[in-house]
Image (spheres, rainbow, N blue to C red):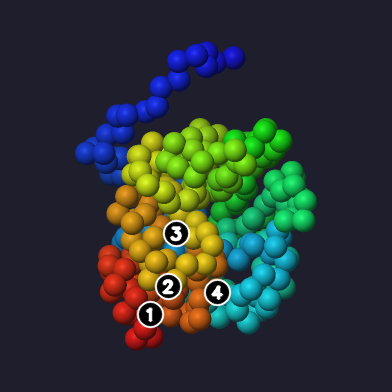
Amino acid sequence: MADLDDIRDGDNFGHNTPADTSKFYLKGIANQSWGIKNRMSRIFNKQSGRTVMLAFDHGFLMGPTSGLERIDLNIAPLAEEADCLMGCRGMIRSSIPPENSKPLCLRTDTGTTILTEMNDNVLISEEDAIRLNVSCMAAMLAVGDADTEAITIRNFSKLVDIGQKYDIPVMGVTAVGKAMARDARYFGLASRVCAENGASIVKTYYTEGFENVVAACPVPIVIAGGKKLPELDALDLCYKAINCGASGVDMGRNVFQSEKPLAMMKAVKGVVHDGLSPAEGFQMYNDL
């Protein structure tokens, strides 16, 4: 067991020394296999090095929450504007047209809902991910939750083994432990645990001091949008995260619960890929 008596917070994050991307345009991926690099290049725009993922996996926890009552009506029309779609296998098969050519990030863990204690999950079969031709597999890590931390990290490690076997990248999705503060220290720890266990992508939350979270994570980080915000605030969240070094966003509610989801999707892309300011992105949203 590690000595826990003298754990010191990191304070030397090398902000003036960016990660080496001379051999591959995404940090931390240069030594991966051809297949993983190829799939990562489907997800992340080669010009900006970033991605706008559209998440609609909420239903496996929340059911038909607002904006996701009809995936075929609310999400499928947005698919062409996303760089990557993140969903569960049932909704992908039933509601996303098979001629869709956008890369898929498959939610591969399942088991509990908002009606019970969450995160007591198991993994779906690896064969199903391959049948769906996914470019990425995602699973939750409930770091800091005493009841489910070990379960979710064990699931995630197994998923990385599968990903390495078939050259499919794996995204670690950080959950917030019940007793954990939503701060850079916690998200930095959770993100690093994902990377240490083999994640090719980490999805976490933006917070004050996010530049340290990004710097200490050797693979691309995308931020979760979280609860619905006013459109300008959501665009500001994207802008701040990108300026801190995030490699994109994986947004759901801030897109599909927007009054004008398609316009919001395009505005988010403008901020993430084109460097628009929040005000410029909001002007785009209003114009559209």
Q: Nearer the viewer, residue 205 or 78?
A: 205
Q: Quadrant of residue 230?
A: bottom left
Q: Which residue extends farthest bottom?
A: 287
The residue that appears at 77% across and 51% down in the rendered structure is: 116
Q: Nearer the viewer, residue 246 or 226?
A: 226
Q: Provide the secondary structure element on which disc 4 rests.
A: loop
The amino acid on which the numbered mark 3 sits, given as a three-letter code, is Val
User: How far apart, in angstroms, are the residues tagged by discs 3 and 4?
Assistant: 16 Å
Give whichever of discs 3 and 1 has the lower sequence position: 3
The numbered mark, 4 or 1, whose residue comes first in the sequence reads 4
Q: Which residue is mark 4?
A: 257
Q: Is residue 95 above or below residue 196?
A: below
Q: Quadrant of the C terminus?
A: bottom left
Q: Are marks 4 and 1 in contact (CB under 8 Å)?
A: no
Q: Give the residue pinned by disc 2.
A: 231
Residue tagged by mark 1?
285
* Residue 249: assigned label: 3
Q: Residues within 10 Å of mark 3 (few under 14, many from 20)?
A: many
Instruction: Look at the image and tell me in which quarter the N terminus lies.
Output: top right
What is the C-alpha distance between the residues marked 4 and 2? 10 Å
- Between circles 3 and 4, the one closer to the viewer is 4
Q: Earlier in the sequence, mark 1 or mark 2?
A: 2
Q: Is residue 241 left or right of residue 66?
A: left
The answer for how far apart the CA atoms under marks 1 and 2 are is 8 Å
- Mark 4 or mark 3, which is nearer the start of the sequence? 3
Is label 1 in a helix, a strand or a loop? helix
Q: How dense is the environment of label 1, judged by Cα within 10 Å: few (below 14), some, or many (20 and up)? A: many
Q: Give the number of the mark in front: 1 or 2.
A: 2
How packed mark 2 is, by other alpha carbons closer than 10 Å (few <14, some 14-19, many 20 or more), is: many
